[in-house]
Image: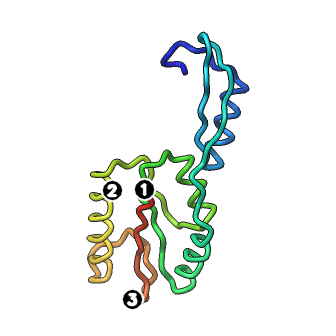
Amino acid sequence: MRENNVQVGPEVDKYVSEHDNLAQMCVSVSIDGKIAGSFAVTDPVKPEAARVISYLHSINITSIRVTGDNWATAAASAKEVGIDKVYAETDPLGKADRIKELRVRLYNSYRGGVSGLRLPSSTSNFILVLNAD
């Protein structure tokens, strides 16, 4: 809206902020340069996602989400299902690079090379990279 010189009041900012924190995207509508309304839309988390992540945790698998979503949306949806680590606002090339980096770090951690993923000492633990976009 601001890019189009439409004044956005504090109540609209508050509405947008509240919904961002709930993993919802807000759409605002203007008519003749004034805000006419706003509404929130969401891409709901699949019902089984929390169960799957819970199961992975029960067998000592750490979950990581690499996504193009904004930080607020990514953090809210990760919290909802229990994902351990989030990398957000990542473009497709960045996602591929992040996954490669995590693979190398994981491989090296098992070989005793690089630490940093803070993996438990047991070799039965590994990382699952989730790319939800």
Where residue 19 sits, quadrant-wise, is top right
Cα–Cα gap, marks 1 and 2: 10 Å
Q: Residues within 10 Å of mark 1 (few under 14, many from 20)?
A: few
Name the residue that disc number 3 marks: 123
1 and 2 marks in contact (CB < 8 Å): yes
For this orientation, the residue located farthest to the top is 32
**Is tag 3's residue or tag 1's residue first in the polypeptide sequence?**
3
In the displayed structure image, the side of residue 46 where residue 106 appears, left or right? left
Name the residue that disc number 1 marks: 133
* Picture residue at 42% right of the left edge, 49% below the top: 68
Q: Position of residue 117 (x, y in %)?
A: 40, 70
Q: Against 95, is 53 above or below?
A: below
* Picture residue at 29% right of the left edge, 81% below the top: 112
Closest to the observer: 132 or 72? Answer: 132
Name the residue that disc number 2 marks: 95
Q: Position of residue 80 (x, y in %)?
A: 63, 62
Q: Against 36, is 125 above or below?
A: below
